[in-house]
Image (tube, rainbow, N blue to C red):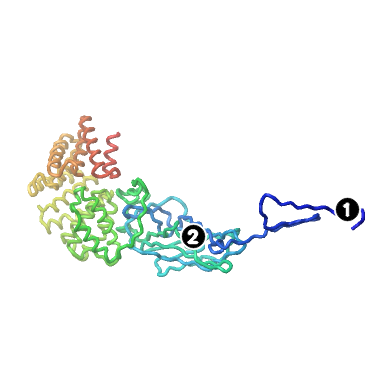
Amino acid sequence: MDDDVQPMQVRNQICDGYYGDVVMAGSIRGDVHFHQGTRDDSSDLRNPVIVRVRRGPGSTLADLVVDADPPRPMAPSGTLYIVTLQARPTTRAVILRAARVVVESRRPPRPACLQPRIGRAIVPRYFKTELDADPPRLHAQGADFPFSISATDVEEFHFEAVVRNDEVRWRIELDWECAEYEGTVVIDDNGKPFEAYPVAALYSEDRTPSPLNSGCGWAGHEPDCPALRFEAQPVPAIEPPAQPAPSDDLYRAVLDLDAGMRVTDPDDPASWDDYRALATQVRMLLGRPDFTGHESERIRDLLVRVVRYFYLSGQHQVGATVARPAHRRWAADLGEDHRDTLAMANRLAGCVFGSGKHQEARALWEDTLPRLGRTLGESHADTRNVAGNLAASLQSLGEYERARELMRDTLGLNRQSLGDDHPVTLRAAGNLAISHFRAREFEEARALQEDSVARYRRTLGEDHPETLQETANLAFTLDELGETQAAKALDEDVWQRRRRVLGENHPQTLASKARCRR
């Protein structure tokens, strides 16, 4: 040191807190880099992985609501699960050794509403799993495990879960290593298992809707489908986890539900809550490959009544998907002229007619009518009922003269063989009244309708759906005759009764509402 240069006097003062590392320097020339030393928290090393999960549409671009009690959304097969993995802020990398899918439970698929969405499907990347396998395996679509993550090096995984047979509750288990620690992190839906619904179960081999399919599509929802009932709930419901009954118990469950019904006549709306529960089990049963549907007369009678319930509650598409395979099997195994085969043919035709396929319905009724005449006789109520149905289909197809001739003959025979107050006779009178209405013969229509309404009210009650339908038809006729106030009073009464009996979203209730607000 030169004699004329005085030594630099340096004083370091540290205050306002605790510092683990301190750098002291008398003078600095050039660049200096400081690196802060860190100590890893052992709790971060024992639980080093941060998981975030979100869903994408994957290969099934649709929303699905399963017919649970109460109805609730469920992820359809092919849903994409996007999992982001990041390490906690430590100096150590985390090695992701392996991942696997764990199935928590399986159950036969329940009926469901599948509503397609408009958009572009995202091609799944990275990993795919087939949940039908036992155990399921993850198949890498590119790079496979192991991977490494850190606080700044994040990995994103796409998992596509595919299932074809059962509803499946599942999760992912991810094995990791960090420093001297190792463990497993569970990836699930915020503490609950993921769920997957087998969309394939909603379609038959020929891609027509299966009995589990609620019949909803681009045009909207079918009446009483699970999606509509889910939306009507005041608070979205979450089904509590439960161990599902084995599929072998479905047959017994259906019979037990039927035996416990307070009202078994589907024409009585008081039975519809029970039929809704029964119909769900029946549709699950029909989805089983080993079920033929003709094992016993009791099962056949039950299926005919369930399809009648579908028709009356406005679920025509569902009714047709249930009735069509049953009718086909019964015709092959029991014979085309068997009484139960003919009963199902009539129910199938009704649901087809309600779906707007009038030509197909006409063909079914034209085939069924002579068979019933040979099997049960011309004067039997079932034969007379099908004759009236055939006449209605002819009228809807514009064959008015033939329809009116058949209606008059049918009404006369019904009155002779069944009586004036029999429901089949009253339906025939209603069909003939509609024929007069379309021919603008309003007085003739009015006479028939007023007589029928009085008989319906006396025999079936003021709230019965057939009473309300005939009353609504009478309101149309009175409107055409210029009796506007009387027509409005009837329309308002029918609307209020249908709201109470059929529900707000039933097609007939909505039609009455539109009439009242026109």
Quadrant of the image occupied by residue 40: bottom right
Label of residue 124 in the image: 2
How many marks the image carries: the answer is 2
Q: Distance of mark 1 from mark 2, alpha carbons?
A: 73 Å
Residue type beneath disc 2:
Pro
Q: Is residue 160 above or below residue 429?
A: below
Quadrant in which the N terminus appears: bottom right
Residue type beneath disc 1:
Gln
| Mark before the other along the chain sequence, 1 or 2 | 1
- Residue 61 visible in the picture: yes
Using residue 223 as the reference point, say whether residue 444 is left or right of it: left
- Residue appearing at x 10%, y 47% in the figure: 414
Where is residue 480 shown, x and y percent of the image? 22, 33
Which structural element holds mark 1?
loop
Where is residue 375 shown, x and y percent of the image? 12, 59
Q: Residues within 10 Å of mark 1 (few under 14, many from 20)?
A: few
Quadrant of the image occupied by residue 335: bottom left
- Circle 1 residue: 6
Query: Is 204 in front, or is 74?
Result: 74
| Residue reaching furthest to the right | 3
Quadrant of the image occupied by residue 322: bottom left
Query: Is 395 in front, or is 249?
Result: 249
Where is residue 94 shown, x and y percent of the image? 57, 64
Using residue 455 as the reference point, say whether residue 37 is left or right of it: right
